[in-house]
Amino acid sequence: MKSLISLIVLFGTNAACSYGASSCQTVNQPATSDIPCTNGPSTRACWKDGFSIDTDFDTQFPITGNTVSYYLKLTNTTCNPDGHGERVCLLVNDQYPGPTIRASWGDIVQVTVENALQHNGTSIHFHGVRQFNSNGEDGVNGVTECALAPNHTKTYTFQATQFGTGWYHSHFSDQYGDGVIGPIVFEGPASANYDIDLGPYMLNEWYYMTTFQASSLALANLQNPNPGPAQAPPISNNILINGTNKDAEGNGKYNQVSIVAGKRYLLRLINSSVDQFFRVSLDNHTMQVVAADFCPVKPVYTKTLLMNVAQRYDVIIDANQPPGNYWFRVSSATECVSLNHGQGLAVWTYEGVEPQTPTTTGNPTEGGCVEPSYLAPYWDQPVPSSSFASTAQTLNVSLTNQVITNGGDSVFVWALGNSSLNLDLGQPTLSYIMDGNSNYPNEYNVIPTVSEGGWNYWIVQQTARSPPIPHPVHLHGHDFFVLGQGIGEFDISGAQLNWDTPVRRDTATMPAGGWLALAFTSDNPGAWLMHCHTSFHVSEGFAIQFLESPSRILMPNRTAYDQVCNAWKEYRPTAYYKKVDSGV
């Protein structure tokens, strides 16, 4: 499938499947190096032990024998990231964003989460991480686990089978918008050379109210019978870059980066918003894109990048301009119905120049709310089309009137496919499977995938019964091939689909009033979620579960699993805040 395969010598099996089951899928490793493996500034395509940018990471990844461990403590506190004033925040290890989870390609990652929040359950999802043969570690309460009750801990264990940039966040209602986020870096090869890895750059909007309050307003606005702005969520107040910015009155501080002329810098961009498309640029500089989400792309230059919620781009910036101070800009993409009262700004300063407020002007931007059309996957990996017409499944996006709250109120919510999602956080889907019970509630919105090894073709289609806005569609347990995107109703006879070089990623945009065609193989057994990553929308039910080879799921330890569930069931009746949304 990829150029390295002809050089691979089979080297036994991968023994790193998380639960040690004998049915673990065989994963082959290369036995010898294909290129000199220094992974230095001029050899970033190489990694080590025979692995490189050419390695087919679907089937091959290192077994390092190394385990990296992190302890994440979630607490109620206050924060003031832009100087406007303190507000309630939910933080990880008392910092915002939370600490970076960093590992090397092939390492085992152990993350222990302590829930010290006063009135919130939680679960931690590792966004974009494939969780190959470790479905129980995906961190989605109501799907793969019970919510973690206050004053309890849980340890997640999985292997870094990919390389690149991801992020972690709470999957408990709208919780991540109040601070439960942090970056993930899996070190590995790259499709272009660079000198220095600057690390993650987390970009997100900021509300002066809590995100739970904003979500309540968003749900109330959705009940408005007049389509348009009246149905939109509240407008956010500012944009943060790595957790900081100045407010409209000049309070706060800018993120600052120092660079050296002549050096090339890798920057890991992460849109960790709840509801914002961003346009991203560095004045007078170009960005060389080398990865989209966890997937390498053929290097390509651009002046600006459009980023939807939850997307990531690894970019290389060449410090080749006259020494000075330059604005790094993050602005809301208004053409994507993203509105914000602020603008994200950071100051990039060349070494030897005194840091001061830049006077540079922004780069020209392209119009339209469309994904970058110039991206091409690093590997040529065609998708078969022969069964598309007969097996493609349409999943309609609509507004529906449904009972989704504990109070029994019938309200308009988002629906995907047959239903609006509404989960019991004490009875996750994975527990049904462990108990041999396939009678899932209708509101769990469960669909099957094709048989193991087959191709799933899904058309996510917006209907006339929903506001015409773009949505970031995210798949758990997989990345997927973006076959096409378009406006209006999908027409199989007229749609222009890319079968030869489709972009591969885990989060892609369904255009406003349009459709998204995606494809992925059934190669990772589990109960997985697909959802809109606009936090307000998924909490309003915009999600579906898909069951993949349930009889082959490698199950977590049942005793530890039930301890988390029993603690949640004991806590839930006395919880201060009652469940009023989908749960995720």
Image (spheres, helix red, strand yellow):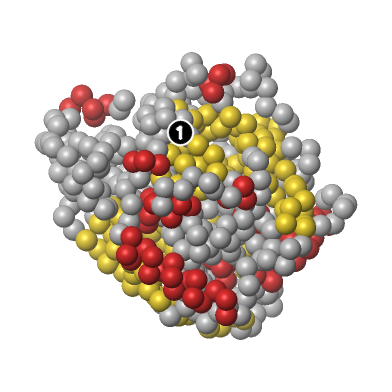
Q: Residue at x 37, y 36 (%)?
A: 523
Q: Residue at x 30, y 39 (%)?
A: 57
Q: For this view, does 243 lie left or right of residue 410? A: left
Residue 453 lies, in percent from the top left, at 37, 29
- Quarter of the figure that contains the N terminus: top left
Secondary structure at badge 1 equals strand
Q: Which residue is nearer to you in this view: 246 or 481?
A: 481
Q: Which residue is nearer to you in this view: 263 or 382?
A: 382
* Crowding near the residue tagged with mark 1, few <14, some 14–19, many ≥20 C-alpha atoms within 10 Å: some
Is residue 131 visible in the rendered image? The answer is yes
User: Residue 307, relative to residue 145: is it above or below?
Assistant: above
Q: For this view, does 531 lie left or right of residue 270? A: right
User: Residue 203, relative to residue 524: is it above or below?
Assistant: below
Q: Quadrant of residue 252?
A: bottom right
Residue that carries the numbered disc 1 in the rendered image: 520
Q: Residue at x 40, y 38 (%)?
A: 549
Which amino acid is tagged 1?
Phe
Residue 562 lies, in percent from the top left, at 38, 65
Q: Residue at x 38, y 73 (%)?
A: 153
- Quarter of the figure that contains the C terminus: bottom right
Q: Which residue is nearer to you in this view: 555 or 28?
A: 555
Residue 236 lies, in percent from the top left, at 69, 65
Q: For this view, does 61 lie left or right of residue 538? A: left
Residue 287 lies, in percent from the top left, at 47, 47
